[in-house]
Image: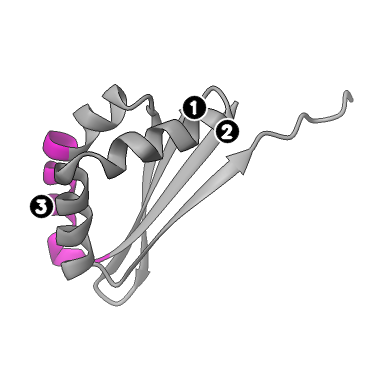
Amino acid sequence: MTGVLDTVVLPEPTVEMWLRRWRGEYLPGARERGLRFERMWRCYTGPEQVTVYLLWSLQTAYDFYAMRAAAAADPSVTEFWAATDALAHDRERRVLEEVPCPAG
């Protein structure tokens, strides 16, 4: 299993509006591109600043590259992230490889 962790740092007053847009505009297409949404967290990380963590999963790392190619071909994805960049302090995407825990 491959994980994808999106981290978006937003001004606190914009978080709910951004989440509504993410749910309505980004999430349906992300599912179609093969991302499985797992979990979301939010954390106050500064004065009037909130970091939103979005955890996704894919079957393999190869699926990540297929998802990226599909996203690059979809102008609504570019538009969503451009709008996010206009108000976010920072954002980052990390691809995570699962590491099995030893028994015991």
Residue 22 position, x and y percent, is 19, 43
Q: Amino acid at mark 3?
A: Met
Quadrant of the drawing holding the N terminus? top right
- 97 or 17: nearer the viewer: 97
Q: Residue at x 57, y 26 (%)?
A: 60
Figure quadrant of residue 102: top right
Estimate how packed mark 3 is, as few (under 14), some (14 to 19) or many (20 or more) residues with alpha carbons within 10 Å. Answer: few
In this rendering, position of residue 24 left or right of residue 31:
left
Q: Which residue is mark 1?
A: 58
Q: Is residue 16 magenta?
A: yes
Residue occupied by mark 3: 17
Where is residue 31 drawn, in percent x and y?
30, 25
Percent x, y of residue 100: 77, 29
Q: Quadrant of residue 96?
A: top right
Give the magenta-colored segment's residue range.
10-25
What colour-coding does the image apply?
one colour
Q: CA distance from mark 2 to mark 1?
A: 7 Å
Question: Foreground: 90 or 52?
Answer: 90
Which three-letter amino acid code belongs to the residue tagged 2? Ala
In front of the other: label 3 or label 2?
2
Check residue 61 in the rendering and tell me which mark sits there, or answer none.
Answer: 2
The answer to whether marks 2 and 1 mark residues whose Cβ atoms lie closer than 8 Å is yes
| Front label number (3 vs 1) | 1
Q: Nearer the viewer, mark 2 or mark 1?
A: 2
Characterize the magenta stretch by its predominant secondary structure: helix
